[in-house]
Amino acid sequence: MQTAQYCREIETYLCQKNDGHLIRVVGPSFELVSRWAAAGVPLKVAFSGIDRYFERYYRKGARRRPVRVDFCEADVLDVFDEWRRALGLPAARSPADVAAGMDAAPARQGASLPAHIARAVIRLTNARATGALGAGADDLVDRISSELDAARASSRGLRGDARRALLERLTALDAELVAMARAALGDSERQAFEREADVELAGFRDAMTAQAYHRAREAAIDRLARERFGLPTLSFV
């Protein structure tokens, strides 16, 4: 996608988020968004970062003025960093980052393990309630939910081997959950996600080995399947 088109897509999305109020992506704002495009930030990732800023903005109460894209930069870069780590892409600066003048930001301290598990239980319960995965998935969802409830009760204050064992178990449960989600996809959806994964990774493909690209592509499809069914990420890093 050309930079000008990328900036137009961001401008259109920002307009929608601002209830139709047009905030132009020009001048310094255009340069800012152009750096996102040059660094390989997928549009959906940029949109998620903008959403994150708006969610925080709404929590402060009634809006006083339209949001400019510049205000969203920190959130966009945070989501981009999370996306890269989730797909196994290097956190160090890539050639695209260097060209764009962007350093890879260090991971910020996130939620505690008990809070992470609590949120995962809520999302898993909501996903089950929608029935999108089909009745055949209920037994697995119920089993995972029960394990998460037990883990939440015992996770506070865990150290050493006990904590490592719990983290490994969360990763194993996560793999089961993703496998279930991918199995629930229809052929057309799966093919669409494969194409979308290729688009997302286009800016990184030339710098990756075939094996690394395959892993990242599979991780991207897993992420899209999660989003499709509203599933949580159970692994905790």
Image (cartoon, rainbow, N blue to C red):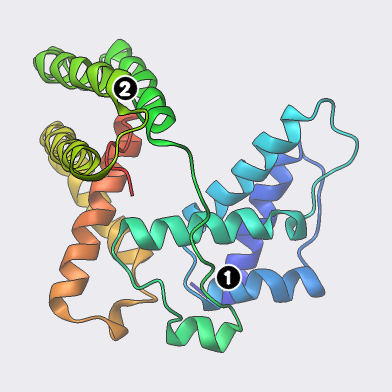
Left or right of 168 on screen, residue 83: right
Residue 197's x, y, as percent? 29, 59
Task: Give the amino acid at mark 1.
Answer: Trp
Q: Nearer the viewer, residue 192 or 56?
A: 56
Residue 149's x, y, as percent? 27, 16
Residue 75 marker: none
Residue 36 marker: 1
Residue 10 vertical position relative to residue 203 in the rendered view, above or below: above
Which label's residue is closer to the chain start, 2 or 1?
Answer: 1
Left or right of 109 on screen, residue 191: left
Distance between the alpha carbons at the discs numbered 2 and 1: 38 Å
| Mark 2, other Cα within 10 Å: few <14 / some 14–19 / many ≥20 | some
Query: Are the residues flagged by discs 2 and 1 in contact, CB closer than 8 Å?
Result: no
**Residue pictured at 80% horizontal, 60% vertical:** 24
Residue 110's x, y, as percent? 49, 45
Q: Nearer the viewer, residue 165 or 233?
A: 165
Left or right of 172 on screen, residue 79: right
Query: What is the residue that sits farthest to the right in this orientation?
Result: 64
Residue 120 vertical position relative to residue 12 in the rendered view, above or below: above
Residue 152 marker: 2
| Mark 1, other Cα within 10 Å: few <14 / some 14–19 / many ≥20 | many
**Residue pictured at 23% horizontal, 47% vertical:** 222
Task: Give the amino acid at mark 2.
Answer: Arg
Residue 170's x, y, as percent? 21, 36
**Residue pictured at 13% horizontal, 42% vertical:** 187
**Residue pictured at 47% horizontal, 72% vertical:** 40
Label 2: which secondary element: helix
Q: Nearer the viewer, residue 159 or 106?
A: 159
Label 1: which secondary element: helix
Quadrant for residue 38, please give it: bottom right
Residue 104 vertical position relative to residue 221 in the rendered view, above or below: below
